[in-house]
Image (spheres, helix red, strand yellow):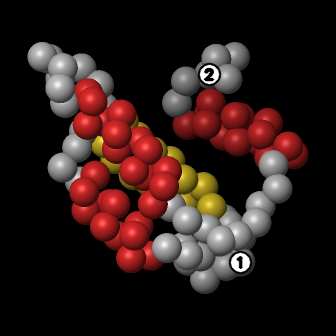
């Protein structure tokens, strides 16, 4: 994906390029990916200098299936150098 420009334009281009190659299906579990990125952020806190910050962008077409686990993962991640952005696309009840 290094061929894409930086910023929002790059995100949109990468999303558009990937979309034809993926298949959406459920259930929609967010906690595993939040916990995965949180592990990277936790490792970054072990560095002597604060030089890394993580932004997790989740683009979803479905309702969250693991809401309790996701809520817990977000609370735990709130203590780390990371942000979580969830964008719902489509007609689902987000």
How dense is the environment of label 1, judged by Cα within 10 Å: few (below 14), some, or many (20 and up)? few
Q: Are marks 2 and 1 in contact (CB under 8 Å)?
A: no
Quadrant of the image for the C terminus? bottom right
> Residue 62 vs residue 36: left or right?
right
The foreground one among 91 and 68 is: 68
Say whether disc 2 or disc 1 marks the residue closer to the N-terminus.
Answer: 2
Is residue 73 found left or right of 92 in the rendered image? left
Q: Could you tell me residue 21's position as x and y percent?
A: 85, 43
Distance (Cα) linking label 2 and label 1: 29 Å
Residue 76 location in percent, x, y? Answer: 25, 57
Which class describes the residues within 10 Å of circle 2: few (<14), some (14-19), or many (20+)?
few
Give the quadrant of the N terminus.
top right
The residue lying at 18 percent from left, 20 percent from top is 47
Whole-percent x, y for residue 13 in the image: 71, 35
Q: Give the total number of marks visible in the rendering.
A: 2
Q: Write down the quadrant of residue 92 in the picture.
A: bottom right
What label sits on residue 65 in the rendered view?
none
Which residue sits at x=54%, y=73%? 64
Q: Residue furthest bottom?
A: 93
The residue singled out by tag 1 in the image is 91
Above-or-below relation of 64 to 42 = below
Kind of element beneath mark 2 = loop
Locate residue 67: give its quadrant. bottom left
Residue drawn where x is 34% and y is 44% of the image: 38
In the depicted structure, whether residue 6 falls above or below residue 64: above
- Name the residue carrying label 2: 5
């Amino acid at each position: 994906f290094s061929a894409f420009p930086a910023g929002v334009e790059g995100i949109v281009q990468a999303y558009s390029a990937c979309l034809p190659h993926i298949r959406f299906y459920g259930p929609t579990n967010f906690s595993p990916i939040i916990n995965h990125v949180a592990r990277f952020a936790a490792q970054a806190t072990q560095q002597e200098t604060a030089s890394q910050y993580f932004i997790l962008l989740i683009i979803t077409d479905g309702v969250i299936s693991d809401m309790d686990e996701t809520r817990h993962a977000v609370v735990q991640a709130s203590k780390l150098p990371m942000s979580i952005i969830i964008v719902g696309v489509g007609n689902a009840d987000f």
